[in-house]
Amino acid sequence: MNYDVKDKKLTGMGKLRIDWANREMPVLKLIKTRFAAEKPLKGIRISGCLHITTETANLALVLKAGGADVVLCASNPLSTQDDVAAALVDLGFPTFAIKGEDNKTYYKHILAALEHKPQLTIDDGADLVSTIHQEKTALIKNVIGGTEETTTGVIRLKNMAKAKKLKYPLIAVNDAKTKHYFDNRYGTGQSTVDGITRATNILWAGKKVVVCGYGNCGRGVARRVQGMGSLVIVTEIDPISALEAAMDGFQVMPLLEAAAIGDVFITVTGDRHVIDKAHIMRMKDGAILANSGHFNVEINIPALESLAKKTRQIRPFVQEYVLNDQRHIYLLGDGRLINLAAAEGHPASVMDMSFANQALSLEYLVKTRGTLKPQVYPVPSDIDAEIGRLKLKSMDISIDKLTPQQQKYLNSWEEGT
């Protein structure tokens, strides 16, 4: 652990911020009340590799209320909120994370979290799962199952399952409707704009913003910057997504074309070297590069460094690269998740649904222990729907229900009128 809990100021600030986030997490609060009464996770050891934020702290408190023994580590070297990590330690959660840790320390912390010998794992990017499968295989016999929070991690896990390398069941929390329709779109959209704004203080109005990728995250980013007055250009490799972007009113073109005219470039694809050397060589003086994908590989940083004759940190989270032809390119947050590196990540209101999926999926894994094969499973549809109902209720929104006659009609094939 990296925090002296005697630092009362740091710990106190973290607790206040955890309480503030809790105000916006009504679904998780309802689950916490039930968990406290029923103890569905009693005696279960959980290791979580997540962004150490106020929202994650509230998830940890819910799992503890359910009887779990929880240890946490960071899922990204720049996403840890140090005051929250200190508060978590003070609240009794061993927490291995510190903002700005190097890769060696990052993986050291993952190994430390695995010393807990978890029966359930929680991942955001699949680093915990991959480490167990590659370096700590002796732990697999203890594991009931796990959950995965993000698109990149789900892709990795599905590839492991396809290669028959996955050794215990995983639930793709990211794929729940109450997760990716809201967290990925509205959370990533707002928090990405927030992170870039905090890092640069740019005026978005009038900027040409290139959004690389038009999945749910890309849709959210494109809409938010459009709302700030930017001219949005979308780049895609999927024809259906590209068509959707065009019909949503955005310009669509290859990245090599967009590279020459963009002011700000934002990657949200989950793939490697989306912005590559050829793109950087075409960019105009002053171009800003940011990433909101999980890993810092979407921008080819070694290529950028090879083109630069000098570099300097000009602002917190802003690295200036001066190229041989005197152009200036600005990389934000070391190419890592800018919404967490330079800001606070997704608002608690959307994480409420995401982490409700986490808590209920972990409960489901315990209830079904021994019956699930080592595959990647969706969140059960009844859990997804219940979270949607609870969120609507918390927002004081009512919706209609089908009458028995309407339900009968929809289930029939004989009547056409």
Image: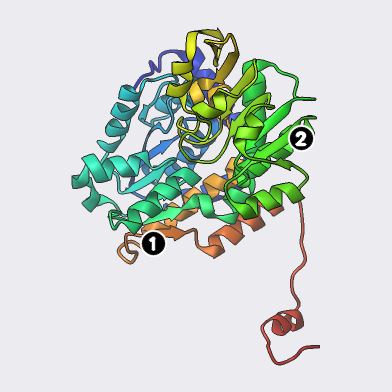
Q: Which mark is residue 367?
A: 1
Q: Residue 226 carries which label?
A: 2
Q: Residue 31: horizontal and vertical position, in percent?
A: 54, 50
Residue toward you, 12 or 132: 132
First reached walking from the N terminus: tag 2 or tag 1:
2
How crowded is the residue under tag 2: few (<14 C-alpha within 10 Å), some, or many (20+)? many
Report the amino acid beneath label 2: Gln
Q: Residue at x 69, y 27 (%)?
A: 261
Task: For the N terminus, give its image quadrant.
Answer: top left
Which secondary structure, mark 2?
A: helix
Q: Which mark is residue 411?
A: none
Which secondary structure, mark 1?
A: helix
Q: Residue 158: horizontal and vertical position, in percent?
A: 40, 54
Is 377 left, or right, of 165 in this rendering?
Answer: right
Q: Residue 55: horizontal and vertical position, in percent?
A: 54, 35
Q: Which residue is drawn at 70% across and 53% down?
A: 392
Q: Residue at x 24, y 42 (%)?
A: 134
Residue toward you, 103 or 86: 103
Is 406 left, or right, of 128 in this rendering?
Answer: right
Evaluate whether residue 38 shows in this view.
Answer: no
Does residue 401 lie above or below 390 as drawn?
A: below
Is 206 left, or right, of 188 in this rendering?
Answer: right
Evaluate whether residue 368 shows in this view.
Answer: yes
Does residue 279 lie above or below 238 as drawn?
A: above
Nearer to us: label 2 or label 1: 2
Does residue 201 lie above or below 405 as drawn?
A: above
